[in-house]
Protein backbone atom coordinates (compact mmCIF):
# COMPACT_ATOMS: atom_id res chain seq x y z
CA UNK A 1 0.00 0.00 0.00
CA UNK A 2 2.98 2.31 0.48
CA UNK A 3 3.58 2.31 -3.27
CA UNK A 4 -0.04 3.24 -3.89
CA UNK A 5 0.25 6.20 -1.53
CA UNK A 6 3.46 7.31 -3.27
CA UNK A 7 1.69 7.06 -6.61
CA UNK A 8 -1.23 9.11 -5.34
CA UNK A 9 1.06 11.82 -3.96
CA UNK A 10 3.01 11.88 -7.23
CA UNK A 11 -0.20 12.32 -9.20
CA UNK A 12 -1.34 15.14 -6.91
CA UNK A 13 2.00 16.91 -7.35
CA UNK A 14 1.83 16.33 -11.09
CA UNK A 15 -1.63 17.90 -11.26
CA UNK A 16 -0.44 20.91 -9.22
CA UNK A 17 2.55 21.36 -11.52
CA UNK A 18 0.32 21.03 -14.56
CA UNK A 19 -1.99 23.76 -13.23
CA UNK A 20 0.95 26.09 -12.56
CA UNK A 21 2.43 25.38 -15.97
CA UNK A 22 -0.93 26.03 -17.68
CA UNK A 23 -1.28 29.33 -15.84
CA UNK A 24 2.23 30.39 -16.82
CA UNK A 25 1.60 29.42 -20.45
CA UNK A 26 -1.54 31.58 -20.50
CA UNK A 27 0.40 34.51 -19.04
CA UNK A 28 3.08 34.03 -21.69
CA UNK A 29 0.46 34.05 -24.45
CA UNK A 30 -1.03 37.25 -23.03
CA UNK A 31 2.43 38.82 -22.96
CA UNK A 32 3.01 37.80 -26.57
CA UNK A 33 -0.29 39.38 -27.61
CA UNK A 34 0.60 42.60 -25.75
CA UNK A 35 3.96 42.71 -27.54
CA UNK A 36 2.28 42.25 -30.93
CA UNK A 37 -0.14 45.09 -30.13
CA UNK A 38 2.84 47.30 -29.19
CA UNK A 39 4.58 46.43 -32.44
CA UNK A 40 1.49 47.32 -34.46
CA UNK A 41 0.96 50.65 -32.73
CA UNK A 42 4.63 51.66 -32.37
CA UNK A 43 4.61 53.54 -35.68
CA UNK A 44 2.08 56.12 -34.52
CA UNK A 45 2.08 55.84 -30.71
CA UNK A 46 5.12 57.25 -28.90
CA UNK A 47 4.30 55.47 -25.62
CA UNK A 48 4.12 52.11 -27.39
CA UNK A 49 7.37 52.90 -29.17
CA UNK A 50 9.11 53.66 -25.84
CA UNK A 51 7.79 50.44 -24.27
CA UNK A 52 8.93 48.40 -27.25
CA UNK A 53 12.35 50.06 -27.12
CA UNK A 54 12.66 49.22 -23.40
CA UNK A 55 11.73 45.64 -24.16
CA UNK A 56 14.32 45.44 -26.93
CA UNK A 57 16.97 46.93 -24.61
CA UNK A 58 16.12 44.41 -21.90
CA UNK A 59 16.30 41.52 -24.34
CA UNK A 60 19.67 42.76 -25.59
CA UNK A 61 21.08 43.01 -22.04
CA UNK A 62 19.41 40.44 -19.78
CA UNK A 63 16.88 38.75 -22.00
CA UNK A 64 19.21 36.14 -23.38
CA UNK A 65 20.06 34.95 -19.87
CA UNK A 66 16.37 34.83 -18.92
CA UNK A 67 15.58 32.94 -22.11
CA UNK A 68 18.32 30.40 -21.36
CA UNK A 69 16.94 29.90 -17.86
CA UNK A 70 13.46 29.26 -19.26
CA UNK A 71 14.78 26.73 -21.77
CA UNK A 72 16.76 24.98 -19.02
CA UNK A 73 13.65 24.76 -16.83
CA UNK A 74 11.69 23.27 -19.73
CA UNK A 75 14.42 20.66 -20.23
CA UNK A 76 14.42 19.83 -16.52
CA UNK A 77 10.64 19.53 -16.42
CA UNK A 78 10.69 17.31 -19.51
CA UNK A 79 13.21 14.97 -17.88
CA UNK A 80 11.16 14.93 -14.68
CA UNK A 81 8.01 14.03 -16.58
CA UNK A 82 9.84 11.22 -18.37
CA UNK A 83 11.04 9.86 -15.02
CA UNK A 84 7.52 10.04 -13.62
CA UNK A 85 6.21 8.18 -16.67
CA UNK A 86 8.83 5.47 -16.25
CA UNK A 87 8.04 5.13 -12.54
CA UNK A 88 4.34 4.89 -13.29
CA UNK A 89 4.99 2.17 -15.85
CA UNK A 90 7.20 0.22 -13.45
CA UNK A 91 4.63 0.56 -10.64
CA UNK A 92 1.90 -0.57 -13.00
CA UNK A 93 3.93 -3.58 -14.09
CA UNK A 94 4.77 -4.43 -10.48
CA UNK A 95 1.10 -4.12 -9.53
CA UNK A 96 0.06 -6.35 -12.43
CA UNK A 97 2.63 -8.97 -11.42
CA UNK A 98 1.40 -8.95 -7.82
CA UNK A 99 -2.22 -9.21 -8.92
CA UNK A 100 -1.38 -11.97 -11.39
CA UNK A 101 0.24 -14.33 -8.85
CA UNK A 102 -2.87 -16.45 -8.55
CA UNK A 103 -4.10 -14.64 -5.48
CA UNK A 104 -7.79 -14.16 -6.06
CA UNK A 105 -9.09 -10.69 -5.57
CA UNK A 106 -12.13 -10.55 -3.33
CA UNK A 107 -15.37 -9.97 -5.16
CA UNK A 108 -17.90 -7.59 -3.82
CA UNK A 109 -21.15 -9.43 -3.45
CA UNK A 110 -24.21 -7.35 -3.82
CA UNK A 111 -26.77 -7.57 -1.08
CA UNK A 112 -29.63 -9.58 -2.44
CA UNK A 113 -33.19 -8.98 -1.53
CA UNK A 114 -35.10 -12.13 -0.79
CA UNK A 115 -38.79 -12.42 -1.34
CA UNK A 116 -40.27 -13.64 1.89
CA UNK A 117 -43.81 -14.33 2.70
CA UNK A 118 -44.71 -12.95 6.07
CA UNK A 119 -47.86 -14.43 7.58
Image: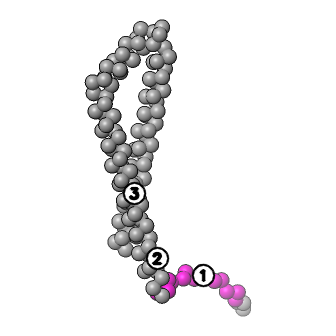
Reading the chain from its start, which is encountered first: label 3 or label 1? 3
Position of the C terminus by quadrant: bottom right
Residue 16 appears at what percent x and percent y? 39, 50
Q: CA distance from mark 3 to mark 1?
A: 45 Å
Image: magenta residue range: 103-116
Residue beneath disc 1: 111
- Is 40 on the left-hand or right-hand side of 8? right
Residue beneath disc 3: 82
How many other residues sit within 10 Å of disc 2, few (<14), some (14-19) or many (≥20)? few
The answer to whether residue 54 is magenta is no
Circles 1 and 2: CB distance less than 8 Å? no
Q: CA distance from mark 2 to mark 3?
A: 21 Å
Q: CA distance from mark 1 to mark 2?
A: 29 Å
Based on the displayed image, in which of its 4 quarters is residue 51 positioned? top left
Residue 4 appears at what percent x and percent y? 39, 69
Reading the chain from its start, which is encountered first: label 2 or label 3? 3
Amino acid sequence: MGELEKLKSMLVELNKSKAVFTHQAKEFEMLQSEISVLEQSADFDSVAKKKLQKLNDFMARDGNQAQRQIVEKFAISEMSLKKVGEQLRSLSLAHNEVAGNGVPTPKKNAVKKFNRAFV
